[in-house]
Amino acid sequence: MRDYRIEPPHLQAMAKLLAWCDEASVVHWTQETADLPDRATAEKRMAESGRLSKVNHPSVDQQAGRLDFRTSDQQLLARVGKKLATSWDRLHRPVGLTRQAGRG
């Protein structure tokens, strides 16, 4: 795992974590097999023994030190969609563009 963490593409992605994410966490995980855990198992383990990682623009939950993974897929998609729209507006505001209803 150490070799994975210090080599591209993981190393390159983690360098951008501060700017890209508003929430980030990590957990130390040891298991007998190479099988990936299911989502519920991974979320439970992260909530029980994970630790927060530093981000430049932390969410309210990140600021409060909460690792809450009980968000439904639909709530998560709505949250991501809202953030993408906000990012689009922020990126295009300097050139006088605004997002219009019904348009990307």
Image (cartoon, grey):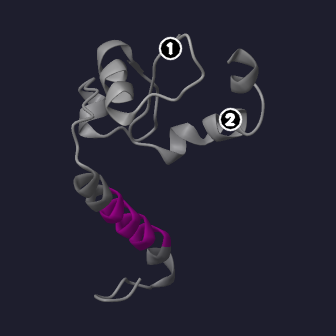
Q: Which mark is residue 47?
A: none
Q: Which mark is residue 29?
A: 1
Q: Nearer the viewer, residue 101 or 2?
A: 2
State the count of labels.
2
Q: Is residue 82 above or below residue 52?
A: below
Disc 1 secondary structure class: loop
Q: Percent x, y for residue 77?
A: 31, 59
Tell me the residue at 21%/37% (across/down). 70
Residue shown at 32% from the left, 88% from the top? 100
Q: Of residues 72 and 7, which is closer to you in this image?
A: 72
Tag 2: amino acid: His
**Residue 89 belongs to the span the image colors magenta:** yes
Q: Which mark is residue 10?
A: 2
Magenta-colored segment: predominant secondary structure: helix
Q: Which residues are magenta?
A: 80-91
Instruction: Using the rendered view, name the quadrant where residue 47 is placed.
Output: top left
- Looking at the rendering, in which quadrant would you find the C terminus? bottom left
Instruction: Identify the residue shown where x is 77% and y is 36%.
Output: 8
- Please, what is the three-letter code of the amino acid marked with disc 1? Trp
Location of residue 85 with respect to 63 vertically, above or below: below
**Distance CA(mark 2)–CA(mark 1):** 17 Å
